[in-house]
Image: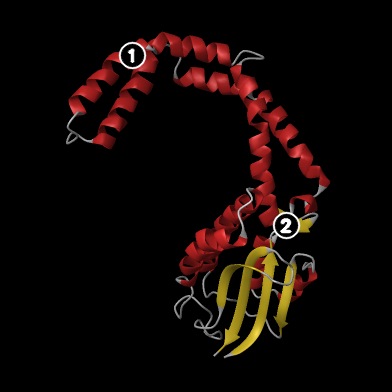
Amino acid sequence: MAEIYAVHFGVLNLGELPSEVSEIGDDWETTLKAKRAKIFTNLSRVVPDESAYNSVIVERSNEGYGQFISESHPSYDKIMLKRKIKMPARASDYITNRNAAFEEGGDFEAGVTESKGAFTTNVKVILRIVGDKDKVYGAIPKLSFALDGKKALLESILNDTYDHLITSTELKTFFVKKQYKTSVVSLINEALAYVVYAVDAGFDDSWIQSNIADKYNPLIAAMINANTVNSELDPATSSIIIEKDSTTGRWGVKLVEATP
């Protein structure tokens, strides 16, 4: 084995995001509220009256729920009878409440405002993993460049604060097909999102290692083998793992390329 490249990409801290991120929630709220009338029009077109409610919502809902529990359920007949009796009786309430909710200042707009905080939090978690390419790159796009063998481009956007370049002899394309890379990057993106949520929730490193890294690393490793990896690399010693880097003190993803 000869290690030719090794690098750890760390997730960003909240304070390292561009200041413009604070505007995202307000923009989302304004945009969604501006579409209130259009959303209501579309809903009204699909379910314009009580008759449509019964055919579009009640009948389809009962059919789907019936398939979900199946006729083998011991209380199937009783459950379905209850739904068939009660749901049509709610048609008038549905129409009335929906119309009221989409009035200006109604429950729709109130719900959008109430959800703005959660929406903004989720966006910030995503940005701490992917970054904003106009201002800062996150771990995921850096990993993508690395897996494509784009050494010069990758190293031009590394940051010593949250990235740790360990070995930089040569960087090769990691996977033989784009679909393999896509699957791995998607899995790592998912894992790092959980890591960020866990860090923010106050879970310690041991918990994150046991409950996230140790669960995802075997899944990632299963995608790295002689059939998926560039033949110039050794699939047994080349790796991609979720771990915390001791130099930067950051959780993130470590890539190692090694030749046979």
Q: Secondary structure at mark 1?
A: helix
Q: Which amino acid type corresponds to the residue marked 2 in the rendered image?
A: Leu
Q: Going by the image, does 83 lie left or right of 234? A: left
Q: Position of residue 240 (x, y in %)?
A: 57, 72
Which image quadrant for residue 82? top left
Identify the residue at horizontal 29%, vertical 20% (top origin).
83
Q: Is residue 184 above or below residue 120?
A: below
Q: Going by the image, does 68 lie left or right of 173? A: left
Mark 2 or mark 1: whose residue is earlier in sequence: 2
Q: Is residue 104 above or below residue 247?
A: above
Q: Position of residue 126 (x, y in %)?
A: 65, 50
Q: Which amino acid type corresponds to the residue marked 1 in the rendered image?
A: Pro
**Residue pushed farthest right?**
19
Q: Position of residue 41 (x, y in %)?
A: 55, 19
Label 2 vs label 1, nearer the camera: 2
Identify the residue at horizontal 45%, vertical 21% (top origin).
46
How far apart are the alpha carbons under marks 2 and 1?
Answer: 51 Å
Identify the residue at horizontal 50%, vertical 81% (top origin).
235
Q: Which image quadrant: the N terminus?
A: bottom right
Which image quadrant for residue 55? top left
Q: Which mark is residue 149?
A: none
Q: Which image quadrant: the C terminus?
A: bottom right
Q: Secondary structure at mark 2?
A: loop
From the image, tell me which residue sits under label 2: 12
Crowd band around label 2 with a 10 angstrom C-alpha radius: few (<14), some (14–19), many (20+): many
Identify the residue at horizontal 44%, vertical 18% (top origin).
47
- Front residue of 246/125: it is 246
Does the image show residue 147?
Answer: no
Does the image show residue 129?
Answer: yes
- Front residue of 200/173: it is 200
- Front residue of 108/174: it is 108
From the image, tell me which residue sits under label 1: 88
